[in-house]
Amino acid sequence: MLTSRYAEVRAYTEQLAAPLSPEDQTVQSMPDVSPTKWHRAHVSWFFETFVLADHEARFAPFQDQYWFLFNSYYEAVGPRYARPLRGVISRPGAHDVGRYRANIDDRMQDLIGGLDDGTLTKLAPTIELGFHHEQQHQELLLMDIKHVLSLNPLEPAYAPRRDSGGSAGVLAWKEYEGGLVEIGHESMADGTFCFDNELPRHQQWLQPYRLADRLVTNGEWLAFMADGGYRRPELWLSDGWARINEEHWRAPFYWIERDGVWFEHTLTGTWPVDPELPVCHISHYEADAYASWAGKRLPTEAEWEHAARLEESDGPANLADQQTWHPRSAGVSSGALRQLFGDCWEWTSSAYLPYPGFRHADGAIGEYNGKFMSNQMVLRGGCALTPPGHARASYRNFFPAGARWPLTGLRLADDAVTGRGPR
Ligand SMILES: [Fe+2]
């Protein structure tokens, strides 16, 4: 039912923002980060702009200037406030944004409840897109507040720590025969949602390959660092080598060295680096350098998706509903690929490009994904901050190769010679 799904998605955003004070919700700690209250308002703007404006009788914007303030990147909708300056906007405050959200909620529920079946069928995909858009921002809200809190010397935590403990277990390899395979979402015709960038489903040729059955750990990353990983140009892509020297990267993004001991800032506070947990907050450049150091490579997105579709679930994925707010250790292998969904978004070696036959939607909504298909790399699988129901085998996340503030990690891949594994 669309109305209950609407209420559920909208309430989860407010649930995630609830532990944050109005002051917390106002800070923008770098241009890539948006204030929490901006996320809460922007996802409401999305419903107002793409649903209410065209379908509500006697539509009037909640507030004229909100169209300008809370437009993210839609050129066709009109001009917008400069992204790097979102943090200087003290008004509307967090409570005013709450009033905006409540207004949009009332109007959306009235609209959905009052539509005839034909109009509702036509409008449902856009409303559904609004749900998935809001879920993307739920994840971003958490990644962004993590950065905001990381700059505070009081080291505040977003939530209490739920220490899963446990070991990463032995790393094993799973082999896949490959061949002519299909990737991409089946279609939206069967009622399941996907973004336009997951379409169309199409054929790809895969050479036999192997995937590590779990993510790379902090302990393994410490060995890479101890072996001069950040000081050996032969391991690095040229752009990556330039970047780590310009910005003096010597460890993952949220690592802090104190008296020779590494600590890690997390959403649950600052803790000594646990060697059994997956390494996280690394750029594509760092992931690629690590793979070179290990004598391996990153998987392509087609390899990742092909394997993900063959694998059985390895227990409940570590998504946001687990409330760990951080990747957890892989644990003992059950024979399936571990940590496939949740924990960390996994860098692939694939550039973010349109699939053969990709068509974006007409109008402003067509700007959602397609216009970002340059200078970004694909990540797969979801992370510990991804809302439940928002991870799937065909999902293509993307970030520039130098991005470190998203919750990213890596899984090693390798060529396989024998091709004796599952198809
Ligand atoms: Fe957005």
Image: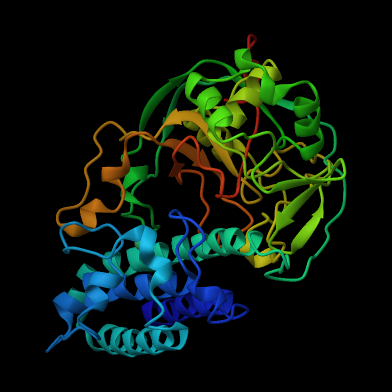
- Write the residue at 31% across / 38% down: 373
Which residue occupies the foreground of this view, 108 or 418? 108
Q: Quadrant of the C terminus?
A: top right
- Write the residue at 49% across / 71% down: 36
**Relative vertical location of residue 62 with respect to residue 166 in this rendering, above or below:** below
Residue 195: where, in percent of width, then height?
A: 35, 52
Determine the residue located farthest toward the top in the rendered image: 417
Determine the residue located farthest toward the left in the rendered image: 58
Residue 246: where, in percent of width, then height?
A: 53, 31
Can residue 389 be seen here? no
Using residue 276 as the reference point, say whether residue 344 is left or right of it: left
Quadrant of ligand 1 in image:
bottom left
Using residue 314 as the reference point, say whether residue 361 is left or right of it: left
Which residue occupies the foreground of this view, 147 or 45? 147
Residue 376: where, in percent of width, then height?
A: 40, 36
**Relative vertical location of residue 22 with respect to residue 71 in this rendering, above or below:** below
Q: Which colour style is shown? A: rainbow
Using residue 161 as the reference point, say whether residue 45 is left or right of it: left
- Write the residue at 31% across / 43% down: 372
